[in-house]
Amino acid sequence: MKAEIVSVGTELLLGTTINTDAAAVALLLSEYGINVYWQTVVGDNPGRVVEAVQRAKGRADIIITTGGLGPTCDDLTKNALAEAFGLELELNKGEEEWLRNLWRERRYTSLDLTPNNLQQVMLPAGSTPLRNDWGTAPGCTFKAGGVLVIMLPGPPRECGPMLEHRVRPILAALSDGVIASHTIHFFGIGESEMEYRLRDYMNSLSNPTLAPYAKHGECLVRVTASAATRALAEEMMAPVIERVKAEFGELAYGMDTANLAEFTTRLLIERGVTVAAAESCTGGELTKAITDIPGASAALKGGVVVYTNEAKTRLLGVPAGLIEEKGAVSHEVAVELARRVREALGSDFGVGITGLAGPDGDGVHEVGTVFVSLADAERVWVREKHITARDREQVRLYACQNAFDMLRRRLTGCTVDEIRVDP
Amino acid sequence: MKAEIVSVGTELLLGTTINTDAAAVALLLSEYGINVYWQTVVGDNPGRVVEAVQRAKGRADIIITTGGLGPTCDDLTKNALAEAFGLELELNKGEEEWLRNLWRERRYTSLDLTPNNLQQVMLPAGSTPLRNDWGTAPGCTFKAGGVLVIMLPGPPRECGPMLEHRVRPILAALSDGVIASHTIHFFGIGESEMEYRLRDYMNSLSNPTLAPYAKHGECLVRVTASAATRALAEEMMAPVIERVKAEFGELAYGMDTANLAEFTTRLLIERGVTVAAAESCTGGELTKAITDIPGASAALKGGVVVYTNEAKTRLLGVPAGLIEEKGAVSHEVAVELARRVREALGSDFGVGITGLAGPDGDGVHEVGTVFVSLADAERVWVREKHITARDREQVRLYACQNAFDMLRRRLTGCTVDEIRVDP
């Protein structure tokens, strides 16, 4: 089965909005083994929407559109789809009632339901509305000319849950056989080296397949198998997964997880282990990442953002003399941060991060120099990293990732790091 | 002039990567008044890349491709473009030498330059390489059949600076006249209400034009004028900008800034004013956002992440009895957080955030309830917000934005908020 994604929105063509919807749609389709060969973006222009849909009709079994369902005069997708399939638009009474109720309950604005809002509940004749519990513009679906059409709202916070709760059941009902996949996550290796080391093996496989890629400073390998049943697909993938993991040893940290931050936070929660963090150059990014996960309060005792030397002294009592002598970006200060924040908050582990995120230097270290430390009751480990990434954001991300990597290694019995310090 | 964007990458069609490049390309094109009517995404499939390029040739003056320039066997864009325009690929000696030097200097991996890397310096005959100082795969540009082709690498950290430093000069040389635009930023109003209030005025304009949109929980209005000179365009925009600002009063916080967090941080730096933050539910997101800005150490004294009740007491001395009596999510605790973190770090302002980000409730408050506080030497202001957003991430973002809004209002002489508390 083949699907095509048509994204509608002048803001996408102007670049003021990033097309996250298309990725979310594609991800769901790939879960059901539905291939996407084309994805087209057009503006709020009925003629070009119709043209894009006409072309998609000729090469796909499913067309999914995003965007252009809202209340403004630019929202023309329903009109265009109706035209492309020769259908009329009709006011959907059920959705109208729902929308009027919603407006009363939520009082989104200081105004009454403005007339432009009713445009949202005009749907192509014969279509089934897809209730939008996350916004105001319903989606809809219809089948015409052998093509299944699904129209979704553009705002990602609406499109995402609509995919999960409205589109997934439709796709699940369509598919025979299964496409199953697992993603193995690595930290500490580049995509190019990984691809080089796996290339021959990858090329020797056809089902399952292997695909390496890079994301958020991590490397991932996606293993995908197609089979009659889920169990069979799993059986086919198992030896491939084993072989990839064996090739990279401790660099493989997990499977089917969001990223290293989430993996490590869940591991902390699972193990009932607590952490506290003292962050200088990352300014709260580490604790922010931990608290992205619901339930993080079981793992995070708290943290301090000691962005200035003064804060290091005032909040943690790091001796001003030590900072002066060794510098804020130093092995010694990193040790104090981890050790002292652990004591201050009474956690099992303390994490310290100090470094130079740039773009300005300090006259001593190269931009990208970071010291990341981990303390438990007995020891302190420190990693000194010289991150060659060329921007501040990436230096800070890698610094946090190194902290998470040290934690997950400590918790899973891997070697933690280069340097060991006994208090 | 019309341009078309062709994004190449199976990872885009699988949804494992979000197409940020297309937005970055589009944004730059729109700066030069170059219209984009179509954007196409295809996988690492030479046939479909050729097809997409053939179609683009027929309707655009400029084709910009992203992706598929790297060292892996999937990287086929140069081959496809050469085929579409009937050109041969040639090893570019200059780029080869540069790549070999780079490899020696940077030692990206533990391996020598692997043979697959040379594929990156095979360019269509007659093209001009675009040196990639942010990665290893050069871009290139050529003109054939009246169409200007520009090929850029896919990784956003390479594509972004390539656009700025390699493509911008090419576009600047092409354009006559200027397209200038300004973006007015608002906090505290929804897109739908804004559009409703501006619709008639918007429709009455043709040059300049107005376009409202929403982003990161803010509303924006983009004003764009096309004229013979920059000065003339500015003159045309000025009264429109005035009128929009007047309509929304204090809700308009700035112009041509990244977002409220960045605007406020720069304002703090400019004014030489310092802040310290005590964050509960946001877990470091506020200080992370402040420290996203280089030079933030002048504005941020430091912060504490008091995600647990214990941390509120241990780090700031908030009385355990008060937390027990009033609850951690309360007006009273918010006051203590702002006041105490300000004192602990000796800053001009203290910010406190406590709330319920969800998805789980606490049995007392609705998910989305947050108290955001701001303390200076004389007063504490508290905002109680009931954020109807439906996910944790958005609740936390809005909480931080309210803190920034209170700060920027205090610094610019606007009303700060509903509730005033005298210590």
Image (cartoon, coloured by chain):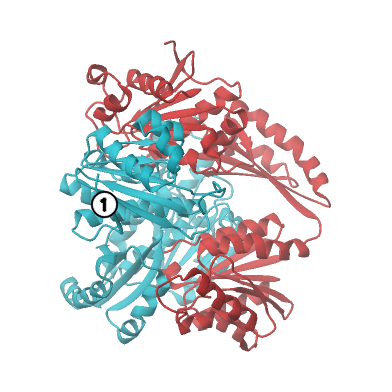
Chain colours: A red, B cyan
> Residue extending furthest top?
A422
Q: Quadrant of residue A252?
A: top right
Name the quarter where the C terminus of chain B is drawn: top left
The structure residue drawn at horizontal position 27% and vertical position 24%, both measured from the top left corner, is A313
Q: Chain of mark 1?
A: B
Vertical relation: A122 (above or below) B268: below
The structure residue drawn at horizontal position 55% and vertical position 54%, both measured from the top left corner, is B76
Vertical relation: B384 (above or below) B323: below
Vertical relation: B348 (above or below) B386: above
The structure residue drawn at horizontal position 41% and vertical position 19%, both measured from the top left corner, is A339
Closer to us: B262 or B125: B262
Q: Is residue A148 visible?
A: yes
Vertical relation: B160 (above or below) B173: above
Q: Determine which residue is flagged by label 1.
A: B407
Kind of residue indicated by mark 1: Leu
Q: Secondary structure at mark 1?
A: helix
Closer to us: B161 or A64: A64
